[in-house]
Image: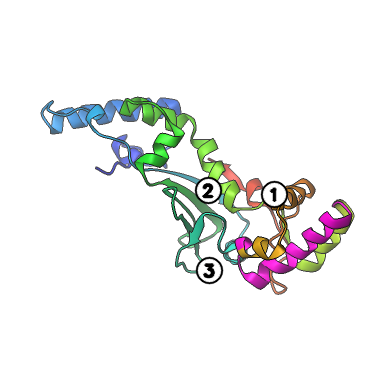
Amino acid sequence: MFVCPSDVLDDYFLWETTSDNASKLCTKLENLITSYFQSEYRLKNFELCRMSFMAEMDVNDRATDYFKMLNTIGKVRCFQPLKSNGDTSFGLISRTKGVEFYVNGLENDKETLRAEVRLTSRGTIRAYSDKKDTAKRIRDIVDKCENIFLHTFRHVIPYGDCYKKPKAEQLIYERGPGGKLRKKMLRLVALIPEKKSIQLALKALDYRNYEEVLEKFAEIGVSPVTIKKRASGKKLQSLYECFNKI
């Protein structure tokens, strides 16, 4: 059984993931199931096996540039890229964890992107909630939705603003550390467009503590993913600064 909360609650607008709405949804589902199955089954007889969370991001008429940046990310650890239109979509699927991640453009709208995290297996949902009762599990997952969404988003999208390669290198010199760590940061900036994948670039970097490198990029507000020379602007604002609401 597939449930669209906004349809169940007769809400024209996108459903907001709040505790109050989750309780309303569970009550309505209970009534619908009881009525349809003539009280033979209740909501507790169904197991939650899939949930999706979405957030919109304002990107100031630069959707195409953001999709080019996203597709430069390519493969990341534990995720495999999905076939997508590089100008209008970006998608990854977890090989083992029952999670899918998408960023899509809205029709005739170059100013807004929609990110979606899908939990696609019972095991994944149980990992986020130990509630046994289905209604309680729905409410529990909704209460945690922002953290669940950001857990995957952070795994895929590096922190920081995106710059063209020379500017990114300049900022690493100005804001970043010195010595070996600076060299690794500069090397990663060069490797990502070459390998067309963050995962492959980190592998080629051959540095065991690669998380330290990514943390330093986040600290200085610069993404290791650079934008093309011919991009329409000198900088892409971090997607973390573009969220309307999760």
- The stretch drawn in magenta includes residue 165: no
Per the image, the residue denoted by label 3 is: 87
Who is closer to the viewer here, 81 or 66? 81
Amino acid type indicated by mark 1: Glu
Q: What residue sits 48% from the left and 69% below the top? A: 85
Q: What residue sits 20% from the left and 27% below the top? A: 42
Tell me if 28 is positioned left or right of 201 in this view. Answer: left
In this rendering, is residue 20 above or below 145?
Answer: above
- The stretch drawn in magenta includes residue 194: yes
Tell me if 7 is positioned left or right of 67 in this view. Answer: left
Amino acid type indicated by mark 2: Glu
Compute the Cα span from label 1 to label 3.
29 Å
Q: Residues within 10 Å of mark 3 (few under 14, many from 20)?
A: some
> Sequence order check: which comes first, mark 1 or mark 3?
3
Per the image, the residue denoted by label 2 is: 56
For residue 154, the mark is none
Compute the Cα span from label 1 to label 2.
28 Å
Which residues make up the magenta segment? 176-199
> Sequence order check: which comes first, mark 3 or mark 2?
2
Amino acid type indicated by mark 3: Asp
Callout 1 secondary element: helix
Per the image, the residue denoted by label 1 is: 211
